[in-house]
């Protein structure tokens, strides 16, 4: 389901939404990992302030009426029922 008013894409397990500054600690966790960034097109973040600057730029760019590219945060839907098999 797509909510055009707040631009969230919600599935049973995940929510895709625009980034907010409060995402910086989570973003820094994976953008400062050598094994993760070796497959990406940007350099490793050196500190959380760098992650905050990037998110702030994305938020600013997201306010333009015509944007070709958007960055989405992917978060687990807290209402999801996730089946974990026991063996």
Image: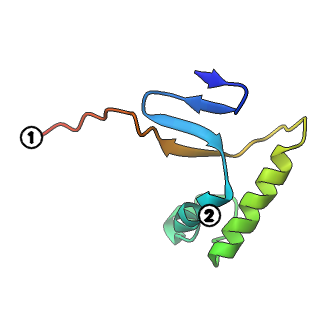
Quadrant (top left, top right, bottom left, bottom right) of the C terminus: top left
The residue depicted at 63 percent of the width and 40 percent of the height is: 17
In the displayed structure, would residue 40 be above or below residue 66? below
> Which residue, given by chain and number where applicable, does mark 2 sit on?
24
In the displayed structure, would residue 52 be above or below residue 60? below
Q: Secondary structure at mark 1?
A: loop
> Which residue, given by chain and number where applicable, does mark 1 sit on?
87
Evaluate whether residue 6 shows in this view: yes
Q: Disc 1, disc 2: CB below 8 Å?
A: no
Crowdedness of circle 2 by 10 Å Cα count: few (<14), some, many (20+)? Answer: many
The residue depicted at 79 percent of the width and 41 percent of the height is: 69
Q: Using the image as rendered, state which of residue 54 and residue 4 is in the foreground.
A: 4
Tally of numbered tags: 2
Q: Examine the image and state in which quarter residue 47 appears.
A: bottom right
Q: Judge from the rendering whether residue 34 lies leftward or rightward of residue 85; answer left or right.
A: right
Image spot of residue 1 (x, y percent): 58, 21
Crowdedness of circle 1 by 10 Å Cα count: few (<14), some, many (20+)? Answer: few
Q: Examine the image and state in which quarter residue 38 appears.
A: bottom right
Evaluate whether residue 38 shows in this view: no
The residue depicted at 85 percent of the width and 44 percent of the height is: 63
In the displayed structure, would residue 34 be above or below residue 36? below
Q: Residue furthest bottom?
A: 46
Image spot of residue 35 (x, y percent): 50, 66
Q: Using the image as rendered, state which of residue 50 and residue 3 is in the foreground.
A: 3
Q: Using the image as rendered, state which of residue 22 and residue 31 is in the foreground.
A: 22
Q: Secondary structure at mark 2?
A: helix
């Amino acid at each position: 389901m797509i909510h055009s008013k707040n631009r969230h894409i919600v599935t049973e397990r995940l929510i895709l939404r625009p980034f907010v500054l409060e995402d910086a600690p989570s973003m820094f966790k994976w953008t400062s990992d050598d094994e993760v960034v070796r497959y990406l097109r940007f350099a490793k973040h050196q500190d959380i302030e760098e992650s905050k600057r990037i998110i702030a730029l994305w938020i600013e760019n997201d306010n333009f009426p015509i944007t070709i590219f958007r960055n989405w945060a992917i978060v687990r839907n807290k209402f999801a029922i996730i089946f974990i098999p026991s063996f």
